[in-house]
Image: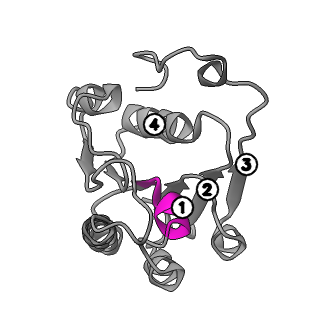
Amino acid sequence: MTDQKGRILIFTGDGKGKTTAALGMALRACGQGMRVKIIQFIKADPAIGEVAAVRNLPGVELIQTGLGFVPAEDHPDFLQHREAAKRGIFLAEEAIRSGEYDLVILDELCNAVALHLLPEERVAAVLHDIKPGRIIVLTGRGASESLMALADTVTIMSCRKHALESGRPAQKGVEY
């Protein structure tokens, strides 16, 4: 690996494609013989397409630490979601500090912060541990200005039109 400084990318916004873009980076990295760790902070469905696909990619691991859709903070189940997010950030910190992975994707981490599952300061502390030449990707709606300031590259995806708004159901291969 290079002596180049670690790199942070964020894919955020209300448009579709944040996770898709990060998975494209995982595919590209895999093709370059790089080791990839993907941690999904909100998703909890082992039947989604990326989980099945990653099983066939050498050097790529995916872990879902989320519990699915996050309820309001006053809901009794909210604390379980917060604990799941804490597990995810622990695994992220472990993966980043280990230096074992060239690319670490923290899928929906921005959502986890925006929904108050994780304190932003904790996430920022983890991002400061990047080893030279390593790449960290954060995805999710609601990336804060502070997190975006830490990043080298920020892409904000905006939704002009979405099939779901016109009543089309989520489609296999597109939304999951």
- Amino acid marked by disc 1: Cys
Residue at numbered disc 2 = 10
C-alpha separation, residue under disc 1 versus residue under disc 3: 12 Å
Identified at 40% across, 16% down, the residue is 172
- Amino acid marked by disc 4: Leu
The one nearer the camera, 21 or 172, is 172
> x, y percentage for residue 176?
40, 26
Q: Are marks 2 and 1 in contact (CB under 8 Å)?
A: yes
Q: Of marks 1 and 3, which one's residue comes earlier in the chain?
A: 1
Residue at numbered disc 4 = 23
Q: Of marks 4 and 1, which one's residue comes earlier in the chain?
A: 4
Q: Are marks 4 and 1 in contact (CB under 8 Å)?
A: no
C-alpha separation, residue under disc 2 versus residue under disc 4: 13 Å
Q: Nearer the viewer, mark 3 or mark 4?
A: 3
Specify start and end residues of the magenta stretch as a single range: 105-115
> x, y percentage for residue 131?
43, 73
- Amino acid marked by disc 3: Ile
Q: Say which element carries label 3.
A: strand
Residue at numbered disc 1 = 110
Q: Say which element carries label 4.
A: helix
Q: Of marks 2 and 3, which one's residue comes earlier in the chain?
A: 2
